[in-house]
Image: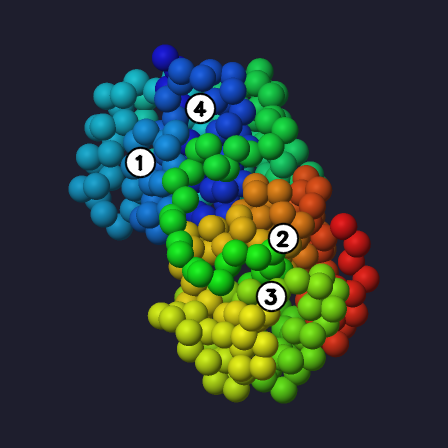
């Protein structure tokens, strides 16, 4: 049995992207073992993957945990260590680990002499190439092949949800905090979506796709979303709301946990969202996706391989509406 240790101590979307490499390893070595070094944050998500046998949490502020994990990992005698997150903490931690071969994808950490001593090879994470191409470089070096698709259903334990109204085909509109100014990066362009233009925007989406619409929100409370919910929806059950005007055609599921959201994405026909973890999910589930992005170069770095994803630059809601109308899958 060949043992792999993957470092992914960043975000959920980054880990979902990494499934490309993990499943390439699985296809080449079906009886292998893949373990993961995670952050405390994403370990709560990664634990639901059936093919990750062990999880080690990397917390640079917890010295006793670091020492315990070093001892545990060194006892396992891993064959390959692959740092995918490019974090300094991951690089320094990995130097203390006894592994036959070590590889890393790096961005801005380049003490070349140090890396040449401790690593079998490393790859520079340049945005000249897409992240997918960077992963292909690692896969080629390991003499394995990138899978044609991510077998999301076979490797992940989906959370069961029971929304009675999610039976017919629907368009999913994911309105998380990335849509609204003051809740995400200050240098982003925002869509000025509010209760004043909400109904017009929803009507456009319904006209475009001719399906029922389900709206989901993230875990951050947004004032404009609260106003929209108050003005246009009545409570149906727990965190589910139905439209006051079109209760059979428009539903809102508030404060959506990510694992609930994955299941809802799996049931939808298409999705409109801001690019991020949710668009990695929709790609893995082969859903037509319209993703709002702030910077084309950065977006293509992450999404260039996503054949069913169309990107739209963030702008005011009028411009976004016109761009959605013109999208063709």
Secondary structure of residue under mark 3? strand
Q: Residues within 10 Å of mark 1 (few under 14, many from 20)?
A: some
Q: Earlier in the sequence, mark 4 or mark 2?
A: 4
Label 4 and label 1: CA atoms lie apart by 18 Å
Secondary structure of residue under mark 2? loop
Q: How many marks?
A: 4
Residue 76: percent from the left, percent from the top? 27, 21
Q: Residue at x 33, y 47 (%)?
A: 44
Give the residue at the far top of this rendering: 1
Image depth: mark 4 or mark 1 in front: 1
Marks 1 and 4: in contact by CB < 8 Å?
no
Q: Which residue is mark 2?
A: 269
Q: Which residue is mark 1?
A: 55
Label 1 and label 2: CA atoms lie apart by 34 Å
Marks 2 and 4: in contact by CB < 8 Å?
no
Q: Earlier in the sequence, mark 1 or mark 2?
A: 1
Residue 102: mark in rendering: 4
Rendered-image quadrant of the N terminus:
top left
Q: Which residue is mark 3?
A: 213
**Residue closer to the observer: 23 or 165:** 165
When asked about the image quadrant of residue 326, the answer is bottom right
Q: Residues within 10 Å of mark 3 (few under 14, many from 20)?
A: many
Label 1 and label 3: CA atoms lie apart by 38 Å
Image depth: mark 4 or mark 2 in front: 2
């Amino acid at each position: 049995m060949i043992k792999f240790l993957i470092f992914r101590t960043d975000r959920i979307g980054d880990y979902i992207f990494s499934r490309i490499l993990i499943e390439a390893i699985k296809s080449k070595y079906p009886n292998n073992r893949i373990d993961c070094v995670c952050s405390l944050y994403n370990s709560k998500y990664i634990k639901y993957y059936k093919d990750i046998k062990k999880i080690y949490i990397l917390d640079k502020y917890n010295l006793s945990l670091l020492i315990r994990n070093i001892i545990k990992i060194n006892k396992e005698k891993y064959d390959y260590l692959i740092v995918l997150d490019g974090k300094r903490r991951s690089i320094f931690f990995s130097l203390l680990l006894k592994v036959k071969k070590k590889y890393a994808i790096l961005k801005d950490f380049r003490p070349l002499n140090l890396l040449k001593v401790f690593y079998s090879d490393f790859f520079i994470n340049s945005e000249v190439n897409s992240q997918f191409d960077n992963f292909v470089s690692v896969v080629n070096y390991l003499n394995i092949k990138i899978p044609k698709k991510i077998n999301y259903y076979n490797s992940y334990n989906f959370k069961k949800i029971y929304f009675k109204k999610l039976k017919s085909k629907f368009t999913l509109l994911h309105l998380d905090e990335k849509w609204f100014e003051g809740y995400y990066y200050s240098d982003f362009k925002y869509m000025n979506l509010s209760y004043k233009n909400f109904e017009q925007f929803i009507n456009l989406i319904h006209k475009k796709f001719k399906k029922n619409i389900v709206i989901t929100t993230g875990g951050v409370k947004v004032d404009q979303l609260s106003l929209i919910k108050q003005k246009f929806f009545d409570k149906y059950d727990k965190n589910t709301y139905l439209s006051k005007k079109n209760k059979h055609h428009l539903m809102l599921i508030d404060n959506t946990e990510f694992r609930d959201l994955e299941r809802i994405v799996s049931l939808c026909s298409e999705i409109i969202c801001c690019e991020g973890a949710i668009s990695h999910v929709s790609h893995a589930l082969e859903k037509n996706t319209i993703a709002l992005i702030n910077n084309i170069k950065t977006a293509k770095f992450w999404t260039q391989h996503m054949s069913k994803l169309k990107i739209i630059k963030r702008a005011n809601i009028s411009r976004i509406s016109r761009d959605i109308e013109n999208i063709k899958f």
